[in-house]
Amino acid sequence: MYELAILARGGVLLTVWALAAGWPPGRLAARLRRDGWQRICRGAWAVPGKETDWRVRETALQLLRPQRICRHVTAARVHRIELLTGPPPADSRSSLAPGDVCLRRGLRVTTAARTVADLIRASGSREAAVVTADSALSRRVVEGVRRDPLTGYEDLAAQLSVRRPGAPRARAWLRLANPAAGSPAETVARLRMADASLHPECQPQVRTPRGQTLRPDFLFRAAGLAVEVEGYAYHGTPRAHERDVARFNALQSCPEIRRVLRFTAREVFTDPTRMTTTIAASLTDLALLGPVT
Protein backbone atom coordinates (compact mmCIF):
# COMPACT_ATOMS: atom_id res chain seq x y z
CA MET A 1 0.00 0.00 0.00
CA TYR A 2 1.19 3.49 -0.84
CA GLU A 3 1.26 6.19 1.82
CA LEU A 4 -1.80 8.39 1.57
CA ALA A 5 0.21 11.57 0.95
CA ILE A 6 1.72 9.96 -2.15
CA LEU A 7 -1.73 9.19 -3.53
CA ALA A 8 -2.97 12.76 -3.08
CA ARG A 9 -3.07 15.19 -6.02
CA GLY A 10 -2.79 18.88 -5.34
CA GLY A 11 -3.28 18.21 -1.66
CA VAL A 12 -6.53 16.29 -2.26
CA LEU A 13 -7.08 12.56 -1.70
CA LEU A 14 -10.09 10.67 -3.01
CA THR A 15 -11.31 7.70 -1.02
CA VAL A 16 -11.57 5.64 -4.21
CA TRP A 17 -7.85 6.15 -4.91
CA ALA A 18 -6.87 4.83 -1.49
CA LEU A 19 -9.20 1.82 -1.82
CA ALA A 20 -7.82 1.08 -5.28
CA ALA A 21 -4.29 1.19 -3.83
CA GLY A 22 -5.20 -1.59 -1.38
CA TRP A 23 -6.22 0.27 1.75
CA PRO A 24 -8.95 -1.64 3.65
CA PRO A 25 -11.92 0.68 4.42
CA GLY A 26 -11.63 0.35 8.18
CA ARG A 27 -7.89 0.89 8.28
CA LEU A 28 -8.21 3.84 5.87
CA ALA A 29 -10.81 5.55 8.05
CA ALA A 30 -8.65 5.09 11.15
CA ARG A 31 -5.54 6.48 9.40
CA LEU A 32 -7.40 9.51 8.09
CA ARG A 33 -8.64 10.32 11.59
CA ARG A 34 -5.29 9.66 13.25
CA ASP A 35 -3.24 11.78 10.84
CA GLY A 36 -5.67 14.69 10.80
CA TRP A 37 -6.91 14.56 7.21
CA GLN A 38 -9.72 17.07 6.66
CA ARG A 39 -12.95 15.99 5.02
CA ILE A 40 -13.73 18.27 2.08
CA CYS A 41 -16.88 16.53 0.94
CA ARG A 42 -18.11 12.96 0.65
CA GLY A 43 -15.25 10.89 -0.75
CA ALA A 44 -12.57 13.62 -0.70
CA TRP A 45 -9.98 14.64 1.89
CA ALA A 46 -7.42 17.42 2.23
CA VAL A 47 -3.89 16.68 3.42
CA PRO A 48 -3.28 17.55 7.09
CA GLY A 49 -2.70 21.25 7.62
CA LYS A 50 -4.02 22.36 4.22
CA GLU A 51 -6.54 25.19 4.24
CA THR A 52 -9.77 23.92 2.71
CA ASP A 53 -10.80 27.04 0.84
CA TRP A 54 -13.08 27.30 -2.18
CA ARG A 55 -10.29 26.29 -4.59
CA VAL A 56 -9.55 23.08 -2.69
CA ARG A 57 -13.25 22.25 -2.55
CA GLU A 58 -13.68 22.89 -6.27
CA THR A 59 -10.58 20.80 -7.03
CA ALA A 60 -12.07 17.92 -5.05
CA LEU A 61 -15.43 18.21 -6.79
CA GLN A 62 -13.80 18.19 -10.22
CA LEU A 63 -11.72 15.15 -9.31
CA LEU A 64 -14.89 13.38 -8.21
CA ARG A 65 -16.85 14.53 -11.27
CA PRO A 66 -14.57 14.99 -14.30
CA GLN A 67 -17.42 16.56 -16.27
CA ARG A 68 -17.81 19.41 -13.74
CA ILE A 69 -16.88 22.91 -14.96
CA CYS A 70 -16.64 26.11 -12.90
CA ARG A 71 -19.17 28.70 -14.04
CA HIS A 72 -20.58 32.07 -13.06
CA VAL A 73 -19.36 33.34 -9.67
CA THR A 74 -16.89 30.49 -9.15
CA ALA A 75 -15.45 31.03 -12.63
CA ALA A 76 -15.13 34.75 -11.86
CA ARG A 77 -13.10 33.91 -8.75
CA VAL A 78 -10.83 31.63 -10.76
CA HIS A 79 -10.22 34.34 -13.38
CA ARG A 80 -9.97 37.08 -10.72
CA ILE A 81 -12.89 39.04 -12.14
CA GLU A 82 -14.31 41.51 -9.63
CA LEU A 83 -18.05 41.45 -9.00
CA LEU A 84 -20.36 44.00 -7.43
CA THR A 85 -23.08 41.52 -6.49
CA GLY A 86 -23.60 37.83 -7.09
CA PRO A 87 -26.03 36.83 -9.87
CA PRO A 88 -28.50 33.93 -9.57
CA PRO A 89 -27.08 30.39 -9.65
CA ALA A 90 -25.97 29.05 -13.02
CA ASP A 91 -28.41 27.02 -15.09
CA SER A 92 -26.76 23.59 -15.09
CA ARG A 93 -28.82 22.53 -18.11
CA SER A 94 -27.32 25.10 -20.50
CA SER A 95 -24.71 23.64 -22.83
CA LEU A 96 -21.13 24.73 -23.30
CA ALA A 97 -19.21 24.60 -26.57
CA PRO A 98 -15.65 23.21 -26.36
CA GLY A 99 -14.30 26.68 -27.10
CA ASP A 100 -16.10 28.07 -24.04
CA VAL A 101 -14.05 25.96 -21.63
CA CYS A 102 -10.41 26.31 -20.59
CA LEU A 103 -8.02 25.23 -17.83
CA ARG A 104 -7.05 28.00 -15.44
CA ARG A 105 -5.29 27.76 -12.08
CA GLY A 106 -5.67 23.98 -12.28
CA LEU A 107 -9.45 24.04 -12.71
CA ARG A 108 -11.76 23.46 -15.65
CA VAL A 109 -13.62 26.72 -16.08
CA THR A 110 -15.59 28.70 -18.61
CA THR A 111 -13.39 31.12 -20.56
CA ALA A 112 -13.20 34.70 -19.37
CA ALA A 113 -15.39 35.87 -22.26
CA ARG A 114 -18.08 33.25 -21.62
CA THR A 115 -17.91 33.87 -17.87
CA VAL A 116 -18.38 37.62 -18.25
CA ALA A 117 -21.18 37.16 -20.79
CA ASP A 118 -23.01 34.77 -18.43
CA LEU A 119 -22.58 37.16 -15.51
CA ILE A 120 -23.78 40.22 -17.44
CA ARG A 121 -26.86 38.37 -18.67
CA ALA A 122 -27.65 37.32 -15.10
CA SER A 123 -26.89 40.72 -13.54
CA GLY A 124 -29.68 42.42 -11.68
CA SER A 125 -28.43 45.95 -12.31
CA ARG A 126 -26.52 48.06 -14.79
CA GLU A 127 -23.82 48.75 -12.19
CA ALA A 128 -23.19 45.05 -11.49
CA ALA A 129 -22.99 44.27 -15.21
CA VAL A 130 -20.58 47.07 -16.11
CA VAL A 131 -18.36 46.42 -13.07
CA THR A 132 -17.93 42.83 -14.28
CA ALA A 133 -17.16 43.87 -17.85
CA ASP A 134 -14.73 46.62 -16.82
CA SER A 135 -12.86 44.25 -14.53
CA ALA A 136 -12.33 41.65 -17.24
CA LEU A 137 -11.39 44.20 -19.90
CA SER A 138 -8.81 46.06 -17.81
CA ARG A 139 -5.32 45.49 -16.46
CA ARG A 140 -5.49 45.70 -12.69
CA VAL A 141 -4.48 44.23 -9.33
CA VAL A 142 -6.99 41.75 -7.88
CA GLU A 143 -6.40 39.90 -4.60
CA GLY A 144 -2.85 41.24 -4.58
CA VAL A 145 -2.10 39.79 -8.03
CA ARG A 146 -1.40 42.07 -11.00
CA ARG A 147 -3.02 40.61 -14.10
CA ASP A 148 -3.49 41.61 -17.74
CA PRO A 149 -6.87 42.09 -19.42
CA LEU A 150 -8.68 38.77 -19.55
CA THR A 151 -10.67 39.28 -22.74
CA GLY A 152 -11.48 41.85 -25.40
CA TYR A 153 -14.59 43.86 -26.22
CA GLU A 154 -15.06 42.00 -29.52
CA ASP A 155 -15.01 38.62 -27.77
CA LEU A 156 -17.64 39.77 -25.28
CA ALA A 157 -19.79 41.19 -28.06
CA ALA A 158 -19.56 37.88 -29.92
CA GLN A 159 -20.67 35.96 -26.82
CA LEU A 160 -23.62 38.29 -26.31
CA SER A 161 -24.66 38.05 -29.95
CA VAL A 162 -25.85 34.49 -29.27
CA ARG A 163 -29.56 34.32 -28.56
CA ARG A 164 -29.80 33.58 -24.85
CA PRO A 165 -32.05 34.96 -22.08
CA GLY A 166 -30.98 38.46 -21.07
CA ALA A 167 -28.74 39.04 -24.10
CA PRO A 168 -30.42 42.22 -25.48
CA ARG A 169 -30.18 44.02 -22.16
CA ALA A 170 -26.62 42.74 -21.67
CA ARG A 171 -25.55 44.13 -25.05
CA ALA A 172 -26.81 47.57 -24.03
CA TRP A 173 -24.87 47.38 -20.77
CA LEU A 174 -21.70 46.21 -22.53
CA ARG A 175 -21.64 49.44 -24.55
CA LEU A 176 -21.12 51.30 -21.24
CA ALA A 177 -17.90 49.41 -20.43
CA ASN A 178 -14.56 51.21 -20.30
CA PRO A 179 -11.27 49.25 -19.96
CA ALA A 180 -9.61 52.30 -18.40
CA ALA A 181 -11.49 51.72 -15.12
CA GLY A 182 -9.23 50.72 -12.27
CA SER A 183 -11.72 49.42 -9.71
CA PRO A 184 -15.42 48.66 -9.15
CA ALA A 185 -15.77 51.98 -7.33
CA GLU A 186 -14.40 53.86 -10.36
CA THR A 187 -16.87 52.09 -12.62
CA VAL A 188 -19.84 53.02 -10.45
CA ALA A 189 -18.56 56.60 -10.09
CA ARG A 190 -18.31 56.93 -13.89
CA LEU A 191 -21.85 55.63 -14.37
CA ARG A 192 -23.26 57.94 -11.71
CA MET A 193 -21.46 60.93 -13.20
CA ALA A 194 -22.86 60.09 -16.64
CA ASP A 195 -26.35 59.99 -15.11
CA ALA A 196 -25.72 63.57 -13.94
CA SER A 197 -24.47 64.60 -17.43
CA LEU A 198 -20.87 64.72 -16.22
CA HIS A 199 -18.43 63.17 -18.70
CA PRO A 200 -14.77 63.30 -17.63
CA GLU A 201 -11.79 61.60 -19.21
CA CYS A 202 -10.96 58.28 -17.52
CA GLN A 203 -7.39 57.60 -16.38
CA PRO A 204 -5.80 60.28 -18.62
CA GLN A 205 -2.08 60.99 -18.54
CA VAL A 206 -0.87 64.20 -16.89
CA ARG A 207 2.67 65.32 -16.09
CA THR A 208 4.16 67.12 -13.14
CA PRO A 209 6.64 69.99 -13.70
CA ARG A 210 9.38 67.44 -13.00
CA GLY A 211 8.16 65.15 -15.77
CA GLN A 212 6.48 62.50 -13.61
CA THR A 213 3.54 60.83 -15.37
CA LEU A 214 0.37 60.39 -13.35
CA ARG A 215 -3.10 59.08 -14.14
CA PRO A 216 -5.92 60.60 -12.09
CA ASP A 217 -9.07 58.48 -12.01
CA PHE A 218 -11.05 61.20 -13.79
CA LEU A 219 -10.22 64.57 -15.31
CA PHE A 220 -12.45 67.40 -16.49
CA ARG A 221 -9.66 68.85 -18.60
CA ALA A 222 -11.20 72.17 -19.61
CA ALA A 223 -11.93 73.04 -15.99
CA GLY A 224 -8.74 71.51 -14.60
CA LEU A 225 -10.70 69.35 -12.13
CA ALA A 226 -9.33 65.93 -11.17
CA VAL A 227 -11.48 63.42 -9.29
CA GLU A 228 -9.98 60.54 -7.32
CA VAL A 229 -11.92 57.55 -5.94
CA GLU A 230 -10.28 55.75 -3.05
CA GLY A 231 -10.55 51.97 -3.20
CA TYR A 232 -11.57 49.52 -0.49
CA ALA A 233 -7.99 49.14 0.72
CA TYR A 234 -7.60 52.87 1.33
CA HIS A 235 -4.19 53.46 2.97
CA GLY A 236 -3.92 50.18 4.90
CA THR A 237 -0.34 50.81 6.06
CA PRO A 238 1.72 53.88 7.02
CA ARG A 239 3.79 53.42 3.88
CA ALA A 240 0.68 53.32 1.69
CA HIS A 241 -0.56 56.49 3.38
CA GLU A 242 2.75 58.23 2.61
CA ARG A 243 2.50 57.22 -1.05
CA ASP A 244 -1.08 58.49 -1.17
CA VAL A 245 -0.09 61.90 0.24
CA ALA A 246 2.81 62.15 -2.20
CA ARG A 247 0.52 61.30 -5.12
CA PHE A 248 -2.04 63.90 -4.03
CA ASN A 249 0.62 66.59 -3.83
CA ALA A 250 2.05 65.59 -7.20
CA LEU A 251 -1.38 65.78 -8.85
CA GLN A 252 -1.93 69.27 -7.53
CA SER A 253 1.38 70.37 -9.04
CA CYS A 254 0.35 69.37 -12.59
CA PRO A 255 -0.26 72.38 -14.89
CA GLU A 256 -3.45 70.73 -16.21
CA ILE A 257 -4.98 70.48 -12.74
CA ARG A 258 -6.42 73.31 -10.67
CA ARG A 259 -8.32 71.29 -8.08
CA VAL A 260 -8.47 67.68 -6.86
CA LEU A 261 -11.60 66.15 -5.35
CA ARG A 262 -11.42 62.86 -3.49
CA PHE A 263 -14.24 60.46 -2.64
CA THR A 264 -14.20 57.15 -0.81
CA ALA A 265 -15.64 54.00 -2.35
CA ARG A 266 -18.25 54.04 0.40
CA GLU A 267 -19.40 57.51 -0.67
CA VAL A 268 -19.63 56.39 -4.30
CA PHE A 269 -21.76 53.36 -3.43
CA THR A 270 -23.97 54.87 -0.74
CA ASP A 271 -24.28 58.58 -1.57
CA PRO A 272 -23.48 59.16 -5.25
CA THR A 273 -25.71 62.24 -5.39
CA ARG A 274 -23.44 64.02 -2.95
CA MET A 275 -20.46 63.14 -5.14
CA THR A 276 -22.02 64.41 -8.36
CA THR A 277 -23.36 67.56 -6.68
CA THR A 278 -19.91 68.36 -5.32
CA ILE A 279 -18.31 67.83 -8.72
CA ALA A 280 -20.90 69.99 -10.47
CA ALA A 281 -20.40 72.80 -7.94
CA SER A 282 -16.64 72.67 -8.43
CA LEU A 283 -17.01 72.81 -12.19
CA THR A 284 -19.21 75.90 -11.82
CA ASP A 285 -16.59 77.58 -9.62
CA LEU A 286 -13.72 76.71 -11.94
CA ALA A 287 -15.61 77.89 -15.01
CA LEU A 288 -15.23 81.45 -13.70
CA LEU A 289 -11.48 81.12 -14.22
CA GLY A 290 -11.84 80.21 -17.89
CA PRO A 291 -10.47 77.08 -19.60
CA VAL A 292 -7.08 75.63 -18.70
CA THR A 293 -4.50 76.59 -21.30
Image (cartoon, rainbow, N blue to C red):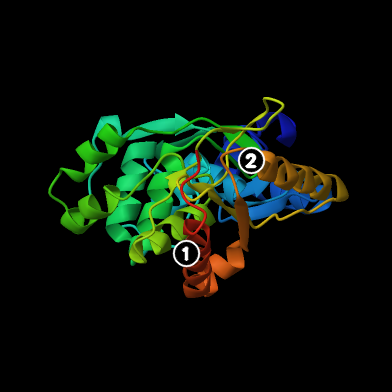
User: Height in image: 20 above or below 193?
Assistant: above
* Label 1 environment density (alpha carbons within 10 Å; few <14, some 14–19, many ≥20): few
Q: Which residue is mark 1?
A: 284
Relative to residue 31, is residue 190 drawn left or right? left
Q: Which residue is mark 2?
A: 12
Which of discs 2 and 1 lies nearer the camera? The answer is 1
In three-dimensional space, the C-alpha distance between marks 2 and 1, rounded to whole angstroms, equals 62 Å
Give x and y (percent) for residue 88: 36, 65
Given the image, on which type of amino acid does mark 1 rest?
Answer: Thr
Secondary structure beneath label 1: helix
- Relative depth, front residue between 3 and 230: 230
Q: Residue at x 58, y 38 (%)?
A: 215
Q: For the view shown, which residue lies furthest in the front direction?
A: 289
Given the image, on which type of amino acid does mark 2 rest?
Answer: Val
- Relative depth, front residue between 14 and 71: 71
- Relative depth, front residue between 199 and 163: 199
